[in-house]
Amino acid sequence: MVTAKKLEPGGKSDLHTDHQILNMGPSHPATHGTVKIVLEIDGEQIVDMEVMVGYLHRGFEKECESGTWYQAIPYTDRLNYNSAILANLSFCMAVEKLLEIELPHRCLWVRTLAGELSRMGDHLTRLGAACLELGAMTPFLYGIEARELVWDLQEMLCGARVTANYIRIGGLQRQVPEGFEDRMAQSLMRIEQLLVDFDKLVTANRIFVDRFRRTGMIPAQRLIEYGVTGPLLRAAGIPLDLRKAEPYLVYDQLDFDVPVGTIGDNYDRFLVCQEELAQSIRIIRQCLPVLRKTRGEPVDVDDPKIRWPAKDRVFGRMEELIQQFKGVTEGVKVPAGEAYSAIESANGELGFYIVSDGTGKPYKVRCRAPSFMNVAPLREMMLGGMLADIVPTFDMINMIGGECDR
């Protein structure tokens, strides 16, 4: 724990006062989740701070081990509720690696599109909240309007706006509904207009830029040593993106760029996330023609022991009813072994290490959550900075309590 210290006597700073100890959190509107920070401040300057990483002790990984493989998917939704589909995807890909199954062509493209939609929703929430918490209400409204359009599309895909529960082991929750592609194309046009207005309001605002520029800085080498990934690392000039470095789904067939910053301050992080939104739109536009061309093709593996039969067949055929009953009560029998699968989430590398003993329940589930890694260097970022700099820095780290659960 940090302790109060007296200032050294002599000089202009000799106010004969103790440093103030300030508790920020564990429930604070600017921390976006349960986390506690104990601050030692001299006036408004940060002398020391202790960041209690993993303060939310929910036992997510043990909860996953208590049910079947399918029952773990809704738990992954609640890791980062702003981009739940990406967490669904990482877990299901790890299970599919043990099952050694090949997914249908259409499924891969739909998963890619859904993942980029989820990334957009996360980035828009992050950027919008960063504006709001510095008093910029108008750009926040532009960002949230764009996010609502994204969530409308997610709702059309799977019936849910936040906790999607969309990806399934061996496929998807359901087929893409009629008219989705046209609705997507229209929404993307409006989102692009909103992003232009958002950018003009924010990057031309001297107060906003001064609050972000040269705050929360830390060398790229230190970020690597902490295990930081995602926009934080790319803003410091390291172009690591798993979609390029270790391609999965159909990313190796897509044309997109990895935006990077220069000095790795909060302003670079802000701009990197803005450009990543543009790249996600670029990726989605490449997916839409494939979705139109492959309409009618399956999105699930043709194996009822892995992907449960559709409800209409369960209600009308005895064999499918039996398979559904066995799947629900016993779970998917995943071959014994261990696997790790990682994707590029909105915050960085999100990976699941799983161990199977051959039964319908996971023997071990371990999540490599980017928020947990990204919060670790917060103390080093803030030492010597101002109390007001914590809010924009925390916004750009984008810590979500559920992901930090330990």
Image: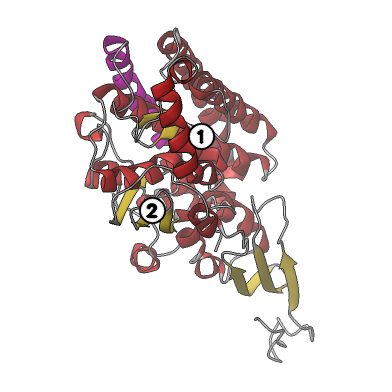
- Disc 2 marks a residue whose amino acid type is Phe
The residue lying toward the viewer, choosing from 301 and 22, is: 301
Q: Which mark is residue 352?
A: 2
Instruction: Say which residue label 1 marks.
Output: 165
Near mark 2 (Cα within 10 A), the count class, few <14, some 14-19 or many ≥20, is many
Q: Which residues are magenta?
A: 275-295
| Mark toward the start of the polypeptide (1 vs 2) | 1
**Cα gap from disc 1 to disc 2, whole angstroms:** 17 Å
Q: How is the image coloured?
A: secondary structure
User: Is disc 1 placed on a helix, strand or loop?
Assistant: loop
- State yes or no: residue 312 in magenta: no
User: Is disc 2 placed on a helix, strand or loop?
Assistant: strand
Residue 397 place in picture, x, y as percent? 51, 53
Residue 95 place in picture, x, y as percent? 34, 46
What residue lies at 48% left-to-right and 37% top-to-bottom? 328
User: Is disc 1 in contact with disc 2, using a CB cutoff of under 8 Å?
Assistant: no
The residue lying toward the viewer, choosing from 141 and 153, is: 153
Residue 67 place in picture, x, y as percent? 51, 50
Q: Main secondary structure of the magenta part?
A: helix
Residue 182 place in picture, x, y as percent? 43, 8
Is residue 260 visible from the viewing direction of this image?
no
Describe residue 59's horizontal placement relative to residue 319 as left or right.
Answer: right
Is residue 348 visible from the viewing direction of this image?
yes
- Disc 1 marks a residue whose amino acid type is Asn
The residue lying toward the viewer, choosing from 398 and 220, is: 398
Describe residue 86's horizontal placement relative to residue 211 as left or right.
Answer: left
